[in-house]
Amino acid sequence: MSGSSSIAAELTRVLGAHKVLSSAGERRMYSYDAIQMGTVPLAVVLPESTADVVTAVKAARAAGLPIVGRGAASGLSGGAAPAQPALVISFTRMTRLSIDPLRREALAQAGVVTLSVSEAARPHGLIYPPDPASWRTSTIGGNLAENAGGPMCFKYGVTGDYVKALEFVDADGEVHHLTRDAYDLAGLLIGSEGTLGLVTEATLRLTTPPRFTRTLMSSFADVGAAAAAVSAAIAAGAVPAKLEFMDQACVGAVEDYLKIGLPREAGALLLVDTDGDDLETVETELELVERACQGAGGQVRRAADDSDAANLWRARRSVSPALGRIRPQRMNEDIVVPRSVLSAVVREVEALGQASGFHLVQFGHIGDGNLHPNILFDPRRESEEAVHALAHDIARVALKYGGVLSGEHGIGSMKLAFMREALDDGTLAALWNVKRALDPQGRLNPGKVLPALESDHA
């Protein structure tokens, strides 16, 4: 009996046929994420409880198989695409969600869709702030694996900032419950991309929505001026709820898609929200941003009303489908740099794109220094090796200016090679010590996040 049929047969016996996918066609659907193709898994388990996850992990351990956790597969670094034949555990059926309004908490299983948390909390006058662009499809488990952010991350923080407790299953199939006390082991799992444990449930902090919000859009002659305005606004004391950036190519793509009157001639756009419970403070912050934009040569338009503001933010959330109309594939970079060097970084990245001959666009959570340069390409006519080389050059720009390789998309397999330039040997060895302590046999999502140590090849 082959490895695929034997593990599938054993899992079907202990979990039931409705929780196991074993046909070639079914398994192939779980071999990729939103950007990266991987290896077809040997079997796929669809657990409905933590007990099911434990059963699957123990079966994989007995068979000596790697395990790859998977949410909605909206990831952009290959994190959920198996790097070798493995058992995939897909959490999309683990959707139990409850709200405790008195404690201002949500208890969510890993498969709960991100937006569902705020929708369930809203009748209680509460919200869940983390809002990645994929919030209508991405799951809490995937958000935790990547420590996802979103447009509200500058003021309100990222996924990990809202975690009060975690339940996870380790590589041996044991269940653990972690809080944020003493050693923050929960914090260690957040952002680890399923390489240290499988998160099955999270207790999430909820908050009240702001009473007032004001929105503006500012257009600039070039990307550097927009970045300079961001630095100036924050230096002046503004803490916007949202501070997002789109370059000219991105604006043109969104306008082609939505046709809502965005200024195609602009070299770059900033979209900004200020919010709070005191209207005077909200207006004052907006004025600080407005003056910074004007000081950098920007043309400012305030949203006339809530509908106008919603339309502007619809433009930002439509970037991904808009870019998908231009080329069949894209490599989505996710660098983070200090705000003090934003202007230089966006200009260098733009120059790299122009020199490459590829269609490159830039957008992102610029208030947090988190930029998403996207390389659009057609693999039928353009070299994927050249695409990867350009992505590597962009990563080097981030490292050159004291930045990091990822803000919220993760390292996965896409940036594995880049990590050798980002980390010194001592730091990489320390991270491997952590990995080996929690996953001694290296069975949890192998081939992701950490490149092999040079000593391993000696």
Image (cartoon, rainbow, N blue to C red):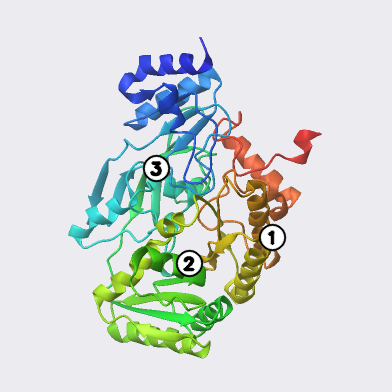
Which residue is at the front of the view, 157 or 248?
248
Marker disc for residue 182: none
- Residue 451 image point, x, y percent: 67, 42
From this view, report whether residue 13 is shown above or below residue 438. above
From this view, report whether residue 355 is shown above or below residue 45. below
Look at mark 3 in the image and give the residue it sits on: 72
- Residue 247 image point, x, y percent: 51, 71
Report whether residue 211 is seen: no
Looking at the image, tell me whether mark 2 or mark 3 is earlier in sequence order: 3
| Kind of residue sitting beneath label 1 | Arg
- Residue 230 image point, x, y percent: 51, 78
The answer to which image quadrant residue 78 occupies is top right
Report whether residue 456 is seen: yes
Looking at the image, tell me whether mark 3 or mark 1 is earlier in sequence order: 3
User: Answer yes or no: do the residues labelled 3 and 1 have beta carbons within 8 Å?
Assistant: no
Q: CA distance from mark 3 to mark 1?
A: 30 Å
Residue 61 vs residue 355: left or right? Answer: left
Marker disc for residue 250: 2
| Kind of residue sitting beneath label 2 | Cys
- Residue reaching furthest to the left: 123
